[in-house]
Amino acid sequence: MIMNSIDIADHHNEIVESIVELSMEIEEDYLLLAGLFKEIFHELDDGFKTANIILKINQDVKEKNESKNEVDKIVDEVKDVVKKVSKYFLEMNEKDILLYSSVNKNIEQLNVLKSRIDAIREDTTDLEVLSINAMTVAIKAGIEGKGFSFITEELKKLSTKTISYTSELSKQGNKIITLFTDFQNGLLNLKNFQEKFYSTFNTNLDDGFNNFSKMLVKIEKMVSDVIEKAQWVSKPIFRIMDEIQFQDIIKQSLEHVIMSLKEMQTESQIEEESINKYAIIEVLSEISINLLSDVELKIMNCFTTYKSNFTLLREILDNIDKEKKNFINKAKEYKITDILNDSTKIINQLIDNIKKTLQQKNGLSGELKIVKKDLDKLIKHFKKYFEIIDRFFCIEIVSRIEIEKREKLRNRKEIIIKMGRLTIQIEKDIKEAMVDMDNSNECSKSIANEYMNSIKMEFSVALEFINKIKSTEDMLIQYNEKLQNSINNFTLYSDNFFHILEEAETKIKKLFERADRIASVKNKLYDLNNNAGKRKKELLKLDHKKNWNIKDSKIIEMVNKFTILTHKQLAGDIVGVSFEKGDKAGELTLF
């Protein structure tokens, strides 16, 4: 059945409406795809930033053209604090060793004092023996020796009391010497303890941190590898984006179709039947069919590219998911927390060592307080010797007088001489002992005050060090928690990324459906073209003509408006005109 002019016009209007609607839908599809892929790139970027958190934890901090990451900075800070702690306490040990030397000298002085006291005791013992001898002489002298007997009895009592008193002082002196010796040994033991601790501590700490750093380097390498592979998804996405750039060409192509259809519409509305009219409709429909075929081919090529790249994309995503799971499992196998715990245990050993050192020093300080107290007591007791020596001198004078008075006793003056000599010797020993006592007391108190003041300062500094060590330890623990959290939640692509990707796939399928509708429109144009061609042949036959050259410049003017050179050439081949100007591929819009 051959269409008449009214049928062609109606059919044509329907085709134009379909093409206009299709053009708008395809443009919308491409613009939506462009927007979706823009979002996909944003999601990828955000995903890589999230994945880089593990690397960001160790983000480079440029200092003097050297790069240091966060954990290196923390470790350096820990080592710096440890170095200061070690240096400080070892310096304190050296100071204690100087004190050790002073204590040693003081012990020597105390031993001299002890020998003085022993000498006093020996002289007093001799005096006691002398009093017994004098008492014997007094008894032999009978009534004349009675007064002297009382004097010798008093001398014996005083000598016995002095011996007892001297023994007590000797015990006190021995106690002080023992306390100082214990203090001295305590200083030496503390020095040995500190040196032994710090000789292995720094090595153990370095080993612990080195193991921790090695594990971090391995994790960082794994993360970098996974992220690098994850970035492979960009390639198929870029290829898809390249195809989306053809949207403007497709749009221009459909505009060319619409231009052709509008020219057809003008011709179809002419009521007069003519060969030229149907020849123009035939040519324009053929141009439209060829242009739509070009659009259809581009869309199908786009769809093929989309499909193959989406398949590749899915494969990459599946592989990356396996890589991610492998990374998480490997990271857990490294037992970073256990390694870090080993390091923090070593750090806590340092804190325990500081506390133990302070406890030991506090104990030594307590011993010195006892020494000070006992020395004060010793001095107080020692001063009583002067009262005793005065009594000895009194007894010696009274004895001298009594012997001079009694004739029977005059020949025993050697007793008084010995008594006087021993009394003078005891007085001399007491005075010398007092000098030694004062020197030892001054030295002891100086040692005690110096040490106790040092202890106060060390307690203050140690507390500051402990707080700093705990602070750096907390930093390491927080770092590890952040690292473990990043590993456990490690992801490369967000849920939104997959959601947008699925939406993009849906849109691409719709684009494929547009290609089916283009084929439907082409079928209608084929019908139009066939009917116009048949009508043209009928009219040629009626006019007894075989050929017809279109007598209308509007087609050429229309083709000149085409913005794609290949479309001009295609139309020129159909019309029989050569076109050389125009853009070969048309203009592109970049997203």
Image (cartoon, rainbow, N blue to C red):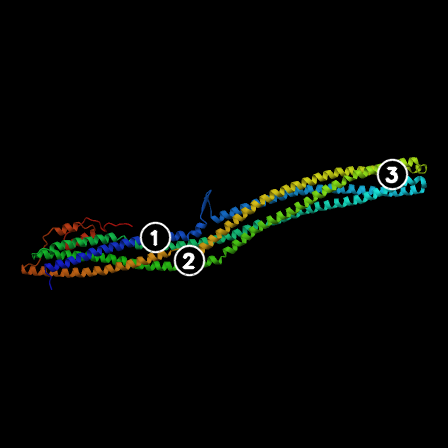
**Amino acid type, mark 1:** Phe
Quarter of the image with the N terminus in it? bottom left
Looking at the image, residue 207 sits to the left or right of residue 501; the answer is: right
**Amino acid type, mark 2:** Lys
Instruction: Work out whether 568 lies above or below 133.
Output: below
User: Mark 1 and mark 3 in contact (Cβ < 8 Å)?
Assistant: no
Q: Is residue 286 visible?
A: yes
Q: Earlier in the sequence, mark 3 or mark 2?
A: 2
**Amino acid type, mark 3:** Lys
Q: Earlier in the sequence, mark 1 or mark 2?
A: 1
Of tags 3 and 2, the one toward the viewer is: 3
Q: Which residue is mark 3?
A: 418
Instruction: Out of 208 and 225, give the one closest to the viewer.
Output: 208
Q: Which residue is mark 2?
A: 324
Q: Identify the image quadrant of residue 19.
A: bottom left
Q: What's the CA distance linking mark 1 and mark 2? A: 20 Å
Residue that extends furthest to the bottom in the rendered view of this protein: 1
User: In the rendering, which numbered label is found on residue 41?
Assistant: 1
Judge the density around disc 1: few (<14), some (14-19), many (≥20) Cα neighbours within 10 Å: some
Q: Residue at x 37, y 58 (%)?
A: 317
Q: Earlier in the sequence, mark 3 or mark 1?
A: 1
Looking at the image, residue 477 sits to the left or right of residue 373; the answer is: left
Q: Exactly how many numbered labels are in the figure?
A: 3
